[in-house]
Image (tube, rainbow, N blue to C red):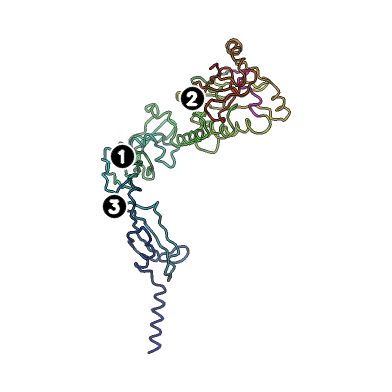
Amino acid sequence: MKQTFLLGLAILLAGSMFAQPSNLAVINRLNHAGVTKVEVVKTVKEWHGGKYVYVAYANVIKAIAPEKVFGLKGVSLVIATMAYYDIGASQPYQVLGTESNGEYRGINLPIPSVAELTKYATDAAQKSPEKFFLQANSIVAVEKVTVTKPNAVWLHPGKLQFEGDMVYVDKLTRETFQRVGAPCTIVLYRDALTAPWYLGKAEAQTMQARYVGDIVHAADAPQWANLPALSSRSVENANKEKIAAMGLTAPPVFNAAKDLALHFHEKLMTLSKDQFAEYMKLLLHSSLRQPGTAFTPDGNGQPMIDRAVEKAYVGWGKYKDQYCIVPNRVEEIGGTYKWYNKRNDRYCSIDTKKDGNTYAIDGIALALDKKQEDDAAFKAIACSGETVSSAASNSNASAANAAYKTGDKVMVEENGKWYPATVLETKPNEWYIHYDGYSSKYDLWVGPSRIKNK
């Protein structure tokens, strides 16, 4: 009898060691300051990390202060939580679940109408179509988003998620396009209850895409024919943000290829290596801004930029030591423009091509001497300041500008506008200036065509 009792007790003890945690134990473990309720959904035995464990799935509910939800009262946050227990353990070895992944309850705000959501979604998709796609190497545009059953959910009073059906345009070949339909999810953000909505997150379900309508030929779709792919647009926007962070402005519109060539030359003279590397991406023809790893006639231009930067900024023979800020000699051959170094024995050139309403770079060739002795020789050569139009067009300007000296207050042209500046240093027909009221990082050398009396 005694043996039977001991055996039963041993079985009970063994069973208790391997029993799954009770709901009460899970609730007690997950309850903490600020929590109003813990809902245990289920506790199951799972294979995890190479062993069997008990996993308790629960909702941890916390009250939210009104100031965190634009003043709304009675809002709570539901945090989906998982607690992992070793078999027989009384405490979990891991608890997962954070407020950042929580869902709000009690947001009793009216949902915008279907018509309003349709307009919000279409406007956002047409303004920032690249946000809807992880990869968009052949997608050129979004035509519309239709919202009929929005399935709208408040993620926060300032975040509204809903669903729609998108129609976008895919480039099949150089000459053909196809409309494609796919479901999409949109999250609109706002900064206050009365603030306007703006696009926060978006995703097109391209795995569920379907063709819509017939194939369209480029000749019948001029609105798409010259559009860059959305991935290229995304890369270009990133480049713009980088150069803006460097204190630079986006390139102007070039009405002539020569304007582009001289602008490129000026930036080589005035920008740092890192600034020029980023700025160059915005001067390239759109066909050279495609993502990729190899340079092809209509592929990625990054290797071309890398070669130009290496030649102009690295080693003996820096570009700005071998060329004058006002080139002595410039030549045009078709769409190719050349300008010569101080000795007139080597030249650089760029090939240009019309890109929309502006000229863009299609090819770059820089010629520099890279020996130490040549570097020293170039630095000793003074610039004449003559331009390609020579004395005929610049004699009056050169005579008027010759009197500029250190400390003079002048006006300097930048991207078509004139700004007050101060002369810091002088060379024959070249002046190193500081833009009044701006950081010294914008100081640069300018020639006669960009400086005048204040």
Q: Which residues are magenta?
A: 318-331
**Front in this rendered view, residue 115 or 452:** 452
- The mark nearer the N terminus, 3 or 2, is 3
Q: Tell whether position 119 is magenta.
A: no
The residue where tag 2 is placed is 252
Give the alpha-carbon distance from disc 3 to disc 2, as whole Å. Answer: 53 Å
**Front in this rendered view, residue 219 or 308:** 308
- The mark nearer the N terminus, 1 or 2, is 1
At mark 3, the secondary structure is loop
Quadrant of res 372: top right
On residue 194, the disc is 1
Crowd band around label 3 with a 10 angstrom C-alpha radius: few (<14), some (14–19), many (20+): few
Give the alpha-carbon distance from disc 1 to disc 3, as whole Å. Answer: 20 Å
The residue where tag 3 is placed is 74
Q: Amino acid at mark 1?
A: Thr
**Front in this rendered view, residue 323 or 310:** 323
- The mark nearer the N terminus, 1 or 3, is 3
Which residue is at a point 39% across and 40% down the rendered structure image? Answer: 132
**Front in this rendered view, residue 221 or 58:** 58
Image mark count: 3
At mark 2, the secondary structure is loop
Residue 342, compared with residue 21, is above or below; it is: above
Q: Amino acid at mark 2?
A: Pro
The location of residue 204, given as percent across then percent down, is: 37, 42
Q: Are marks 1 and 3 in contact (CB under 8 Å)?
A: no
At mark 1, the secondary structure is loop
